[in-house]
Structure formats: structure tokens, C-alpha cells
Amino acid sequence: MAQEHSHDHPHDHDHDHPVLKYSDDSEHDYDETARYPLMAEAMRQLLIEKGVVDADRVRDLVEFMDSRSEAIGAQIIAKAWTDADYKKRLLEDGTKAVEEFDIPMLGAELIVVENTPDVHNMIVCTLCSCYPRTILGLPPDWYKSKSYRSRAVIEPRAVLKEFGTDVAADTAVRVHDSNADMRYLVMPMQPEGTEDWSADQLADLITRDCMIGVTRPSVPETVAAE
Amino acid sequence: MRRHHDMGGNPAGPIELDEVPTEPWAKTLTAVFGAVREKGLSTVDELRRHLEDLPPEVYDRGYFQRWAEAACDHLEEKGLLTRAEVEARMETIKAELEAKK
């Protein structure tokens, strides 16, 4: 009988069971004889055998998923910061504006919300865990957690504090609850002193958490001092 | 009455910020289901109904765990496979993996 694999121990032991590698070759591993790895593999095999899905297409979709990361979102926001016309298009019709970067929204609508000195935006999906995956990659665990889903809409300032983000009392906090048909992306405020930076330089400042709206971009001190 | 998945506004504990990479099986599951959806055999809302119908103790197992159970119910309802077939295949795969040890 295979043991349930717990993740609270160091990962330097030898394995006596086959382990599928992570695509990023990270050191993490898991027990592929546990219930859910078996279930995913069983459904994959059966649906391919029955001709419902195509094996190559499934592989392509895994690759596509691995190709998505916050770098894509950062590129979009940096473009908006440096190109007023693009910013206007992005705020008017997010779905259409990200198509310019060949980013599909897979049937959902994208709404980009802009942070200003008066308004701080953050996103959540209280009912499930809807997230702009084609722009930011797969969501972090905390985004899918009961704590975040429950609390973000009732005590957003307290939640933001847990991410180290203090929002001034006279700045409104707007929480956007995503759903299956509608995804949000936060356009953070461009940090002061970066007005003459290139889009590529700016993109490095824009993290996943900034675009979920739980943190704000900041200029690293080493850069600011230069 | 509010159902289990409808948790917005409920009291809950602190946010756990650990970053854990997504396990490969979870990506496989997502890709398989994406392929089913592309064929026009499923919609997001159909899957959501099955997610929301899960008993709370199954729902709370974890995001991709609940997804796997809901996908299985959904595919069975669509007549694309049965849960019994899935469970049987899981046993076969497990036996193969253990034989390789």
C-alpha cells in the first residue's frame, strides 16, 4: 500500500516509487500512486482510448499552460504604462487589447481595472477560483484558499495588510469578484521616478501579486540609488 | 440557504502565503478537461454545477482534487465515461506502477 505523500519533510530522500518530473525540473516530487494522480491519468487514458480527446492536443495544452506566467501580464501593463493609446484600449476593452499580444481569453471577458491615488483595486473569485490564467499562469494556492475567498470581500484592508500592503484610509478599496465569464486584471500605478524607463525595465517591476492587487510595484533600493 | 462553495464574506483564518508548484497530475487534468471543452462537449458552467454539488468534505480536499471528482461526475453524466471505469483503470495503473518498483 502506497503511503500518502506528505510535503512537510525534506526532499532529499531516495524514492522507491516512480515519480513524474515537474516541467521545471524542480526538486519537488509526489506519489503518483496516490488517488488524484491516478485519477487524472485514468481519465486521460480513457478519454484518449474512446477518441474523445487527442493525446497530442492534451500535451500541447500542458505546454501552453507551462508557457503562461506573470511575465505576460507584466508585458501588457508595461506597454500600457508607456503607450497612452494602448492603455486606453486596454481599459476600454481588455479582451480585445490583449489579443494584440496573441493572448486568448478562452471565452471569458477581461476587464482591466486601474489603480489611482484615490482607488486601490484587488481581485478575488469567491465562488470558485476564476483567474486570468492565460495572462498570469495558474493561480497561487492562496488565491484558491477558503481564507482569501471568504475574507477578501468583507475585510479587504485586513487581507491586504497580510500581504504587507497598507492602503491609506482616504483611498477607496474596490474588490472585484470574478466569475466564469469575467476575469479581472489590476493595472497598478507606475512607481514614481520610473517615467523614463523602457517597457522592458518596467515589466521587471510588475509582479503577479501587483496584478491581483494584493501588492504594489516598488523600485528596488539598489536601482533607486543608482 | 447558502451552499458550501458560496463562502464570500464568511469569517476565516489568516491567508497562507506558501508558494507550492502545481503538481504535474493537476496540469494533466486541466489539459484533458481543456481538450474536452474544446470539442464542445462541456462548458465551464456545467463543470461548476458538479463542483458545487460535491459534499463539503470532498470540496475541501483541495482545488484540483475537487476538480478531479467533479470532472468525473460531469463526464459520466455526459456519457463519455463512467466512474466505475475510472476507478478500475486507477487500480490497473497503480498495479503497473507498483510492479515497476
Image (spheres, coloured by chain):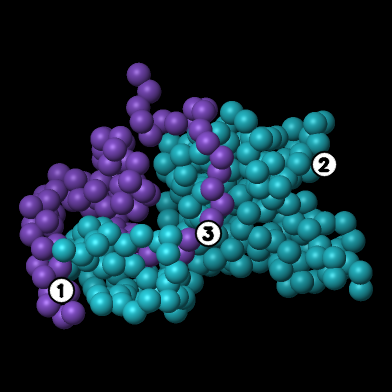
Chain colours: A cyan, B purple
Q: Give x and y (percent) for residue A40.
A: 24, 61
A110 on left or right of A1:
right
Question: Vertically, is A85 above or below A180?
Answer: below
Query: Disc 3 marks which amino acid?
Result: Glu
Residue at the location (40% across, 61% down)?
A: A7
Tag 3 residue: B19
Q: Is residue A216 something that shows in the picture?
A: yes
Tag 1 residue: B98
Q: How far apart are marks 1 and 2 (CA)?
A: 59 Å
Question: Vertically, is A178 above or below A61?
Answer: above
Q: Where residue B3 is drawn, which disc sits there?
A: none
How crowded pointer 1 is (Cα within 10 Å; few <14, some 14-19, many 20+) is rated as some
Q: Give x and y (percent) for residue A128.
A: 42, 41
Q: Where residue A117 is drawn, which disc sits there?
A: 2
Quarter occupied by the C terminus of chain A: bottom right
Are labels 3 and 2 on one chain?
Answer: no
- From the viewer's perspective, is the residue at label 3 or at label 1 nearer? 1
